[in-house]
Image (tube, rainbow, N blue to C red):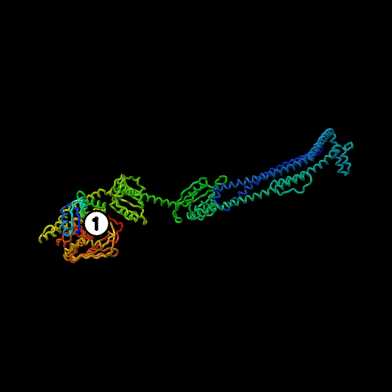
Amino acid sequence: MSTRILIAEDETFIGILYKKHFESQGATVKLVGNGKQAFQAMESEQFDLLLLDLIMPIMDGYEVLKQLKEKKATIPVIVLSNLSLDIDKAECQKLGALDYIVKADNDAPDVWAKLQKYLKK
Amino acid sequence: MKLRGRINAPVLFILTLCALFFYLLLSAQRFLVQSLAINEQRHNLLIILHELHEEQVSRMVLANTNHDRSPLADSSRIEDDRIQTATQLMTLLDAKNAAFLSTYDSESQKMFVAGQAIESALGERDIHQLMSAWLAREHDVRQALSAMDRLGEAQTVGLIPTGTVLASAVRTVFSQGNLSGVRALLSTPDGSISLVWVFFLAFILVSFIFLYITSYYSRRLSVIAGVANEIAAGRADRRIADLPAGPIGDLGSGVNALAAALQRYTSKYQEDLYKEVEQKTAALKFDRRRMTEIIEGSTDGIAAIDRDFTFMAFNRVYEHEFRKMYGRKLAVGMHLLDDALIEHPDEVQVVKDLWSRALRGEEFIVSKEVDNENSGHHYFEVAYNPIRDEHGEVIGASQIMRDITERKMVEEDLRHAKERIEEEAQNARKFQLAVESSTDAIAITTADTVLIYVNPAWEQLTGYSRDEVIGKKASILKTDLTNPKLFDEIRSAIKTGKQFHTEDLVNRRKDGTAFSAELTLYPIIKDSVVQLFVGILHDISQRKNVERAQTEFVSLASHQLRTPLTAIRLAIGALSRGEAGSVDTEGQDTLKRGMEYAVHMAETIHTMLNISRLEAGKLNVQATDVNLAALITETSFDYKIECERRHQTLTTTCPPDLVLQTDAPLLKEIIANLLGNAIKYTPDSGAISIDAFVHDDKVNILVKDSGYGIPQQQKDKIFTKFFRADNVLQKETSGTGLGLYLVRSLAFKLGGSVSFTSEENAGTTFTIALPLAQTPSHPTV
């Protein structure tokens, strides 16, 4: 069974480019535009990993992390954001994110390579 | 003539008799008077004895005083003692006198009785008898006289012839040698013996007997009177010898008894007197010895003179000082003016005036300054006092000379010290004024951070008044908005007495409002112990707000720049990988170049963001245990794709168990920058390596490449902001000139250093040296 990845990214163009590359690598990808949609998706489907943007309308990435933590969800979450302050990274780590990737510093293959660490199991 | 001769002879005889009789009476009376005189002289003797006693006491005292002269003996205290002693003595003597008097009274009573006995014996038995006998005789004599007168008158006419007869009869007797002449003489012309003659002869007989008796008594009495007088004169051992029985003998033995009693009491009295004098003298001697010890032991020079300016006494110190001053050795009895000061005539008048004042009864103190080669410069305080005897009469004067040079010097030193302190105080006031008027908030605390001073600027900044905070801990300004780690650093600095600086403090004012504070602590260390801390506090809220806004702006700006850049980068990538349509070979080259610019822009944004945070002080070192091998692997992982693309080899070596305490993201940033540079400035197919090891307690991380190298002449500029080497500029490589600046800044931040070796077109090796463990605090100035 292929890897199922949920991408929460409000910039659709960027999301689609990740989706295309991950799918080219054999993954099953679902793309949502905000946190609320991400929860809806997770309620109906199972995912192996959540790639989460921080700044999103309706429900941002922090809120998603908070609620996941409250629900004691086990899904691995990788934050993918263009924010790069230490406090942002620290906050995400505190809320249970496994990694933090700065979007602009990484091409899609770089991101895919980093995700592998959390998908091996 | 003849008649007168006849009559005068009996009259003269009677008169002689009368005179003798009166003499007898007078002698008896004189004895009584003398008895009374003895009594009186006894009293005199007593007074003499008393005087003698006093004289002896004073003589002995004087003898003692002379023997052991001391000025203090003349001091008022000793006078008091003496008066007291004399008074006690007098009291004792009075008691003795009283006892003696009573004894004497009884003796004199006895004598008076004896006298009365004599009087009665003599007067009643003899004198009165004699008197009455004499008076009776007188009557007879008077009668006889009157009879003779009458006879004479009657025979006046016949007297001449009778005389003639008498004369012739005498003549006859003397010429003829027969008694008929005498008979003729004694017979009247008528032949009978005349009655007048009988009376006359009888009277002569009686008179002779009487004369004998009176002369006997008179002689005896005069002997007794003589001896009594001698006894009265003080010779109590005199006695009357050859005492006859009878009233005269009684009188004599009475006098003898009186003399014996007197002698007895006198000797006993003298004995007591001497004993007492001896005791008093011993006590005085003890006092004197003690006084002498005190005087000799004194560090003051003490001397006494009498009214004639002759030295009576002085102690060793005085002698020593005098010799130093006047070069003369003193001796008791030396005259102060004529002898002791003989070589200093110019001083005589001054010295004399001073002593004279004391001799006039004045008590005073003068200062004396002496400066000569013998004694050097000395100051004395000299006290003059009169010496009085027990009656308050000034008999001399004393001088107490105290060397106060040392005291003067101490006073002088004190004065200098005071001036210095005053000067210091003025300086201190200047400093205080400077601190007071400073616009920087300045506080001074004890080593335990208890506030002991705050300046007005501090009061203004914190809202606390000086009186409110003095004695309180500086931590009254503390808030929990400050990173707790900073407090640990401050405590450590205080404990170790190190200078400390921070700009990350958040303090609270009295009204509760918080402010960002910059604090600089300066320890004031004396004898290796922190005495005080001076704290300078600045409100940097405004600056912090600007910085915060700046950081937020940079953060927001970088985010806004990155979002489109991400899209561009992903689009180029997708195109080049054929995920978004196909591109021909020429198009692929263009995409590759476009990707390079996109990557450069991403790096620039990343580096600028880091530098912005570094310069804003937002990069806080948070040390944790870091496994270096894992960190290197993780970092190189990010560059694996790029290396592969350039056909470069990337090798890493690191002991797998090498753990150091450092800030992992910052170290990663350093390695990433150096690795990025190595890849960028090494041609395709080059070799790149990262080697880590521990050397001299330092972790060494070597990032080595076989690239273009750094030109020799530009080696000292490579860590400068925005610097890019000439050779790499020609190679069409992209770069911001910020990477190495950031690397060096971060290496310093982690307590380490960065160095490099390079050879152009052969390669470069950067070496990062880091401590194994982060020190808890290091200045960030």
Quadrant placement of the N terminus of chain B: top right
Quadrant placement of the C terminus of chain B: bottom left
Q: Position of residue B598 (x, y in %)?
A: 15, 57
The answer to whether residue B584 shows anywhere in this view is yes
Number of numbered labels in the structure image? 1
Query: Residue B636 versus residue B727: which sits nearer the camera?
Result: B636
Q: Position of residue B746 (x, y in %)?
A: 24, 58
Left or right: A121 as drawn, with respect to B278: left
Q: Position of residue B124 (x, y in %)?
A: 78, 39
To which quarter of the image does residue A98 belong?
Answer: bottom left
In what element is the residue under mark 1?
loop
Label 1 packing within 10 angstroms: few (<14), some (14-19), many (20+): few
Please name the residue that numbered disc 1 is placed on.
Answer: A98
The subunit carrying tag 1 is: A
Query: Residue A3 versus residue B355: which sits nearer the camera?
Result: A3
Left or right: B308 as drawn, with respect to B738: right
The answer to whether residue B14 shows anywhere in this view is no
Q: Position of residue B573 (x, y in %)?
A: 15, 58
Query: Residue B41 versus residue B289: which sits nearer the camera?
Result: B289
Query: Residue B310 versus residue B495: which sits nearer the camera?
Result: B495
Amino acid, disc 1: Leu
To which quarter of the image does residue B685 belong?
Answer: bottom left
